[in-house]
Structure formats: structure tokens, C-alpha cells
């Protein structure tokens, strides 16, 4: 039995970036679930990006996956971040009250849409091409993102919080904490990293979301994770990239 | 009690296009579930796009939704097409074997990603802007979509079929039919509409997907639906738009 197989979960995600895998890492950390971040181990221990390629090639046997993050739980493997979170919530009730499963998925998918649009600000033409080769198109896309999409999505989530009397405006889903709150934390942190000018200019529009972000960051297990080397930094290789020319007031 | 409230489900989606609402319409039709396509009714009967706007403004009361499709089932409302399908599958086992719920969601979300990329071929810069104002960027994005993303996604789903021995290569999820097969039908039909040259050039690469599409089209309730006025035509207002300049061999 290898080190990987002994653990509760094996997560397969690119070892250098937060990306969509971070939504799963946050949930595993907050749930206190034992897991191995396989690709972050050395290649001599079965890790590295090669581990992901083996899984994409079908090594685990339980159905093929198009892309990481991929979570292995015994004989079951699941991919697609929102699907993994939905799956984890059935095993860790702390991540979502079972009665709120559908509502949590729905809000998570809305965050997924927003994440995809945030990503496309720097890659509007082709994922496979360099940013530098689509920089002019990126400026146009980012301008529309900041002007239209940002207020549309964040305004929506702020309204969800404001109207959620059951949670005293403190949580997005139902009466209590859910993995969607973790995702809100990650998205707000990423936006503040990528678009600091826009974030500061608009922060007054989303007081409840900011308060939620800060509460999530102080949850004991989340705080321990954020202070550890397991938390990778934001960088210009992930979803949220800080290119000053794409931010509000950026050079044109 | 209004006409709407008497029915099993009320679907809220733009009345002129297939769009993401079509994934839900196909599932409701195939399940033989009674539903009212509310916005397609006259405004004098509570229909029209105004009905959608009322729901987005929170009229139904069960949590706000950012965008249609929105499905109402009694006191419950659900949005996000994949979430609605997951919800419907819990009530109509024909749409997914309960044991395959997570796998169906995962594949559905992968189709969602592909749908989003198909959409962005004609709107790479801003959803809110006209196609004509982002036509040059659209040509670039469509070229990358056809060269890289199309074979990646369709090759993946073809492999899923080929390796699915439990269904004799006839279904995407588990041993039998699921709503994911309906989505495969819709996506393949849309690609053939939007990119006829590319579709014909690459159809030999996906024999199992083509056979699946044809089998789905001949399911009795699906065939009845496709032959009815309830099925809206593809058009240049939906996800799949036929702009010859974006297709393989299109003018440059």
C-alpha cells in the first residue's frame, strides 16, 4: 500500500497553481478531511504533473476525466470542481446541510460561471495561446468584465446574503455555513489580487460579501491552511492574474 | 389558481431561443413531465419575457436566480441548467439511475464547459456587445475552438462511449439512458447547425456520438417534441449560431 492509498482522499491538481483545485483544497481543509495533494509530492513518490497525466489517461479506472481537479475516494473518482464539492458535501455534512444540496450546487455553478469569465479576461481568444498574444483583446474583454459582469455577479451574491434572513445575512446557503461560502472567499480574494484598483473602488458595494470573506478566513482550519505552505500563492499562471493593464485605471 | 399553477412544472426561459433552456425542455419532454413553458404564453396569460423578469426580481420567493433557465416545482425553484437536470433526475429516475447521479452531473458540467466555449466563438469580447463589433476576434476564437477545443471535448465524449461496456457503447452514463444523452444530442445538433463544414469534416472521428445522437432523436417522446411547434429552430440568437466566416473554410 502506497502513501497515497492510505489516506482518505487523493486530490489530483496542478501542483504550482491554486486554480479550480483550490475550491476543493479549501473544502477538504475546512472539513478536516485527510487528503494527499498527489501532484505536489515528488515524482519519486508518485507525484508531480505526471500523476495527473496518468489519471487523465484512465489509470484509476473509474471513468475518464477531461481535466483536473480530480478527487479519488476509494474506488470512486470525481472531477469538475462543483461536482466534487457536491460529492464531498454528501460525506461531510458540515460542508452543506443535506436539505440545501441543490441550492448550494446552483450557487456554486453561478460562481463557476463567474470564475470562467474572470479567467477569460486574460485569455479571451485561446487558452492554448500566450497572454501576450491576446493582450489587446484581453484589455477589451477585461473592460467589459469590470463594467458589466463584475457588478452583475457580485451584486447578485450580495443580494443573496442580504435576503438570507435564516443565516442573519452571514451565509450564502440556508441557515449556516456551506462550501459555497469557501468559494466566495476564494473568488473575492482572487479578484482583490487580480484587480486591486477595481476591488477597492467597488468594495463599498459589497459589505456583506467582504464580511463573509473575512469570517471564512478566520475559521480555524481555514486560517491554519492559509498560514501553511500548503496554500500556494496567487500568480500569473492561475485563474486570477494581476496584469495592471487589465485593471481599472490600467494603461491603455 | 392560474393555468401555470395547475401544471407539474413551470419553466422560465427566453421564448425565442433554444439556448441553455433547451437542455431542460428536452429532459421534461423525454420524461413525459407536465410543464408550462411560461414565457412562451401570451403576456395576457402571464407569459412573455416579462414573466422571466418578474422571477429574476424574486417574485417566486424561494431564493433569487441570476439568469434563466429557472424551473419551478411547487414551492421549490431551481436555476442553472445542470442543477435543474440534477434536480429533475431525483424525481424522474428515467433521467438518471440514482447510483449514477454524481457521474451524470460531472459529464453534464463538462458539456456545460463546451457549450460555453461554443458560445464564446461568436462573443469572445463581451456578451453585451453585438457580434458585428467583435467579428474579427470571433474569427480568431472560432479557429482555436475548431482546431483544439472541438477535438478535445468530442474526442473525450467519444472515448467515454467507447469504454462504456456496461451500456454496450450506447450511453454516456452507467448502463442506460440519462439526461446527459439528451444533452449530447443537443450539442451535436447545434454544432452541425453552426459549423456544418467542420462537422462534416470531423464526423468520422465520432461514430459513436453520431449514433447516440440519432438514437436520442428517435426516442418516441423526443421525436414527437422535435416534430412539434414546441421545438424552436436554431437561429443566430442562441448559443449555436451559423456564421459562415467562423466555420471551417470560412472566408477570412
Image (tube, coloured by chain):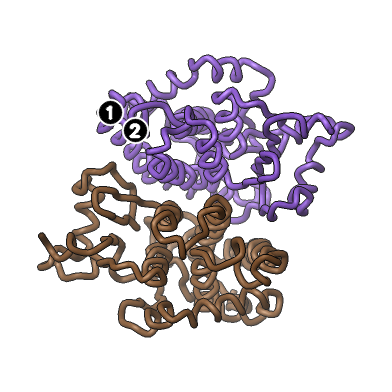
Chain colours: A brown, B purple
Decide if residue B63 is on the left or right side of residue A3: right
Mark 2 Cα shell of 10 Å, populated few (<14), some (14-19), many (≥20):
many
One can see residue B128 in this view: no
The residue indicated by pointer 1 is: B166
Decide if residue A180 is on the left or right side of residue A3: right
Label pair 1/2, CB-CB below 8 angstroms = yes
Mark 1 to mark 2 CA distance (whole Å): 6 Å
> What's the residue at 55%, 76% (across, down)?
A213
Q: Nearer the viewer, residue B129 or A46?
A: A46
The residue indicated by pointer 2 is: B174
Which chain hosts label 1?
B
Q: Percent x, y for residue B156?
A: 33, 40
Which chain hosts label 2?
B
Q: Percent x, y for residue A228?
A: 33, 83
> What's the residue at 12%, 67% (across, down)?
A45
Decide if residue A175 is on the left or right side of residue A65: right
Which labelled disc corresponds to residue B103?
none
Amino acid at each position: 500500500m502506497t502513501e497515497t492509498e492510505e489516506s482518505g482522499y487523493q486530490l489530483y491538481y496542478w501542483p504550482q497553481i491554486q486554480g479550480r483545485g483550490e475550491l476543493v483544497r479549501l473544502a477538504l481543509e475546512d472539513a478536516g478531511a485527510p487528503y494527499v495533494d498527489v501532484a505536489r509530492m515528488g515524482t519519486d513518490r508518485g507525484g508531480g504533473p505526471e500523476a495527473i497525466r496518468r489519471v487523465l489517461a484512465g489509470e484509476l479506472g473509474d471513468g475518464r476525466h477531461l481535466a483536473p481537479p480530480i478527487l479519488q475516494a476509494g474506488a470512486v473518482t470525481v472531477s469538475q470542481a462543483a461536482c466534487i464539492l457536491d460529492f464531498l458535501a454528501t460525506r461531510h455534512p458540515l460542508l452543506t446541510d443535506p436539505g440545501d444540496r441543490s441550492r448550494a450546487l446552483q450557487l456554486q455553478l453561478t460562481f463557476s460561471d463567474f470564475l470562467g469569465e474572470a479567467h477569460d479576461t486574460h485569455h479571451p481568444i485561446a487558452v492554448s495561446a500566450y497572454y501576450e498574444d491576446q493582450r489587446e483583446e484581453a484589455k477589451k474583454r477585461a473592460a467589459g468584465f469590470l463594467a458589466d459582469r463584475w457588478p452583475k455577479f457580485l451584486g447578485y451574491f450580495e443580494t443573496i446574503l442580504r435576503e438570507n434572513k435564516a443565516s442573519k445575512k452571514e451565509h450564502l446557503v440556508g441557515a449556516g455555513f456551506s462550501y459555497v461560502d469557501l468559494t466566495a472567499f476564494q473568488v473575492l480574494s482572487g479578484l482583490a489580487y487580480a484587480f486591486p484598483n477595481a476591488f477597492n473602488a467597488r468594495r463599498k458595494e459589497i459589505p456583506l460579501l467582504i464580511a463573509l470573506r473575512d469570517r471564512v478566513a478566520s475559521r480555524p482550519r481555514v486560517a491554519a491552511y492559509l498560514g501553511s505552505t500548503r496554500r500556494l500563492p496567487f500568480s500569473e499562471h492561475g485563474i486570477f492574474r494581476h496584469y495592471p493593464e487589465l485593471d481599472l485605471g490600467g494603461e491603455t
